[in-house]
Amino acid sequence: MSKYIATRAIRGSNALVTEAEFMLQKALNEKGPDAKVEFPNTAYYLPLTLGMMGLEVETLGQLNDVLEHARKLLHPVPSSRRWTPYLGETLDAGMATLLAAEAIEAIRYVYGLQPEPFPGFQLAGGTAFFGANGSTGEKGLENHLNGPIDDIQLRSWGIQLVDGRMPGFAAIVGAAKSNEVAVKIVRELQKRNILTFLCGNVNGRSIIDQLVEEGVELGYDTYTVPFGRDTLSAIYALGFAVRSALTFGGMKGGQARDILLYNRERVFAFVLALGEVDDLKYAAAAGAINFGFPVIADTVIPEILPTGITKYEHVVSMPFNEIEGNDDFERAERLVQKCIEVRGVKVKIADVPVPVPYGSAFEGEVVRKADMRIEFGGKHSRCFEYLQMVPLDEVVDGKVEIVGPGFEQVASQGSMDLGIVVQVAGRQMQTDFEPVLERQIHYFINGASGIQHIGQRDIAWIRVSNAAAEKGFNLEHFGKILHARFKTDFGAIVDKVQVTIFTVPEKIQEWLAVAREAFDFRNKRLADLTDNKVEEFYSCTLCQSFAPDHVCVVSPERLGLCGAYNWLDCKASFSINPTGPNQPIKLGKLIDPIKGYWTGTNDYAKVGSHGQVQEVAMYSIMENPMTACGCFECIVMLIPEVNGVMVVSREDTSMTPAGMTFSTLAGIAGGGLQTPGVMGVGKFYLVSPKFISADGGFKRVVWMSSNLKETMAEEFKAVAIREGDPDLIEKIADERSAATVEDLMVFLEEHNHPALVMEAMF
Amino acid sequence: MPIEIPKDKWPGSVRQVVLGATAAEGGTRTSKVVVGGETCMPFMHFEGAIPNRPVVALEIRDRRPDDWSPLLVKTWENVIDDPAAWAKAAEEVGADAIQLTLSLTDSAGQPMSPETAVATVKAVLQASGLPLIVFGPGQSEVDNLLLVAVAEATKGERLALGICEDKNYRTIVATAMANDHVITARSPMDVNLAKQLNILISDMGLPLDRVIMDPTTGALGYGIEYGYSVMERLRLAALQGDAMTQLPMLVTPGYEAWKTKESKVGEGVPESWGDWLQRAINWETMTAIALLEAGANILVLRHPESLKQVEAAIQDLMTAPDMVSV
């Protein structure tokens, strides 16, 4: 905690509590202790006091208790000689400030000074005060600012804050650099559906004045609520936060800790301090930090960056004139971006903004040559796509840049080189998720009607149909699609997305080199990612809907049997959906490194299979093999006569040496049953060093469907070399060379297959 | 020879959920419904306690439904245009609760407005003192719009609000919390999805004794075994002690059975199918009773005759036989 901030906040709170005490004394003398105290149109008394102290304040006299409590929370200003941390003291001071501020506003109500009179002002929807403060209009929305939000509006906005339609709220305190900047900031917040509360001033000038001068409508209808032109009115924002917790968090008055935690976890609010920060603002900011609401200032103030009470930074200074940008508008935009980032507000995007229909129904569409406007990649051009994780401040969310000409000048049915670079940033993002996200580009782009996407990485191939081009689909729309979809589908790990599309050769070359380096790195990372280098595997229960007792245990060297989920996918899936089907399995104690038993995997097998499976061996087909649902890409099965296993792929409909076809075998392998000698697996598990390694590994494979051999020829070749037998694949029979066990035996002997001389499998 | 009956002893139990609040509890209901609380599989009286019998609700609509079987329309003809009268009629034929489904559009084809929905719900509450279950039309955005308004206008009645699913649970849960209602959490026939939704709901802070789960089901001959199996597994998990599955279950056999061909079509079907009305009622009844055996706590039906038969079945099943004399 910054000593400077602590000092000023504590000083500010001492001053305010003292002021509140004087005001209360005066009010008690003039109005008596029984004078009624209330905020209008709320059933929550003085909400912050109710929430924090459990006190239902109805009379002036009760405010004595409140201020007494506030006084107790105060600490002396740190002496110049002490250098200890001050977090606790500062937070207490902040809370004292809030209690005192609420008491002062309540007293002001007694005197008719709240909501703040503002002659000539007209609220665009707000709390109505009939006849109060000289307001004469039918609905009482004239000549005063809003003051606290009424309960009806609280319910309406509260639900939207809870269900995410409204991403969060901003409390702006002070005044912006200029009227134009004030307007820009508010527009940026409105654009994102962020509720904006306005209060405070700098040397008597408030952002409310600035907005009014510019003719901006303020009120409930425009999601901008002018609380008051002094710092104290910021208390209404925190009163709103407390009432949210009481209404939608099921909490009761007095559950201070729960209410504060609720706000930290669920109410995405932040304070934006515009202009000079005085003692009182520091004190109020310390109050907001109690709620987990960070403070972002557009002036030079000391920062508190470590995480603690707030989810990320506590206090961030972003001096307005030093913000990068061509003009003040861009600076204002960046400032708002930063606020969103610091609080971790997730902004949703409703629609994919493209001129063609969009949806998963269009994913399988094919664009034929005759209907094609242009293609990128394929025979006549190059196309690559690359998703890169970068630091938060290097991404401008939503920015789509085209470097080079569009395809307008290219002849119909022509082709063009293209590079798509997606840069993402996020607090929860990890480099490991890059490939997981990058793979989504295929689905996202395919979702647009009239666009076809095939391949990935540097062999991507995209076609745009005439129909789509006629509707105005252009290169920029690739970026728009990717931005919208990544934010919507992966908002949990991605906070910002920017897309750059290259069509100039030099740039394509330059970025292709960067991309290839990354692809290389990823390949190595995958190769290095072994079971003994991680502390947790992942469960996958996606298929329990039809195989209730089956559970996949996914490890770096054993992907899910469907082939669709590897360890990284599961890890990303867990980050995105922490209550979803992929849960981390802490490995615990290693029981048997050969067969692959850990205490953690065994315990999980019991729970995940509802007691059906007691133990699971990760690397053996003979002892407690992993169960299968029915989605496996291939079936591995023991052929006892030849001391090896066969591998049948799903595409193979022919008879196997086991005397059964794939579909018959599937009944034995699936359904969540543990059958020693039979196992359903993903085809890439076949090339893993951990493929039935307890039983002898890949050398046990004596028979394999020919289509597998062909489609994975490269991979198998590498495995053969790894196993020290480069000709191994030729020694493995298939449906063309052996359809029965007898034929198989002959074939293996002819080819001198190693399984024949390996130790007995059982 | 004495026969020893093997017994299961379960560590867990189903939570008890109360629907409807009487005047003393801040509502206006004249009766309430308590479901759940069992410590054994359905009707295994010798293994544990079944403190509350399953209950039957009748489904009514806010206006004349466009897609109901003519048989049902005929049955309710006198009240079908007036939800309040319909609710009253449902109470008179012996329903334990009313389930009101709001339509997507009003009878003029305009989108249903929250004001109309609120007026309908209030009229129904006025006409019948039974606990009320209110379902939106089943499109999450419209459900949110209508149910939030309904929830606020009926604060304290302890209605059950649905349909609350993964797409819109936050909104429905928030409004239920703010207005003291119960929710029905629907998931598409999957144990894990049901459980996940319950976790998400409970993460929001809604106490689980205000949650009923609707695991979805199919009609007899139309996937009922799938639904049955999901319910059975949910109940087994609950009894084994999994807190996130220990919620009473609501299912809608009326809705399911009345959309089957056997119930909907009276002409051009084999003669051996027998009397149309009898067949339709049998279909609904058989569907409901099968689900009862799977562990349903609240059954939502459409025809008064099915209601009678299912109520009779419940009475039978709830009479614990004296095991010693068996």
Image (cartoon, coloured by chain):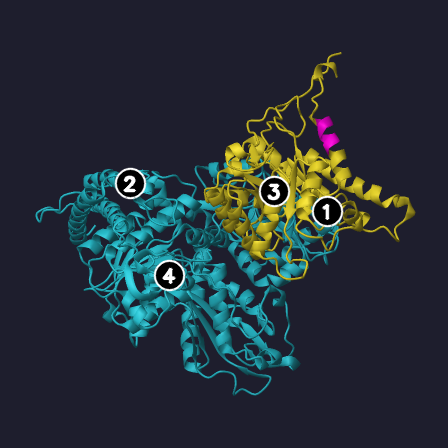
The residue drawn where x is 69% and y is 22% is: B320
Tell me which chain appears cyan.
A
Give the residue number, with chain letter if any, for mark 2. A59
> Does B315 lie within the magenta span?
yes
Give the residue number, with chain letter if any, for mark 3. B126
Report x, y in % for residue A645.
Answer: 64, 47
Both on one chain, marks 1 and 2? Answer: no
Q: Chain of mark 4?
A: A
Tell me which chain appears yellow.
B
Q: Indicate the amino acid at tag 3.
A: Gln
Prevailing SS of the magenta stretch: helix
Give the mark toward the camera: 4 or 1: 4
> Does A378 lie within the magenta span?
no
Report x, y in % for residue B93.
Answer: 73, 36
Distance from disc 4 to disc 1, alpha carbons, whole Å, reads: 46 Å
Give the residue number, with chain letter if any, for mark 1. B79
Query: Which quadrant of the figure contains the C terminus of chain A?
Result: top right
Please tell me whether mark 2 sits on a helix, a strand or a loop: loop
Along the viewing direction, whichever of A605 and B194 lies nearer the viewer: B194
Along the viewing direction, whichever of A500 and B190 lies nearer the viewer: B190
Q: Which residues are magenta?
A: B311-317
Distance from disc 1 to disc 2, alpha carbons, whole Å, reads: 53 Å
Q: Chain of mark 1?
A: B
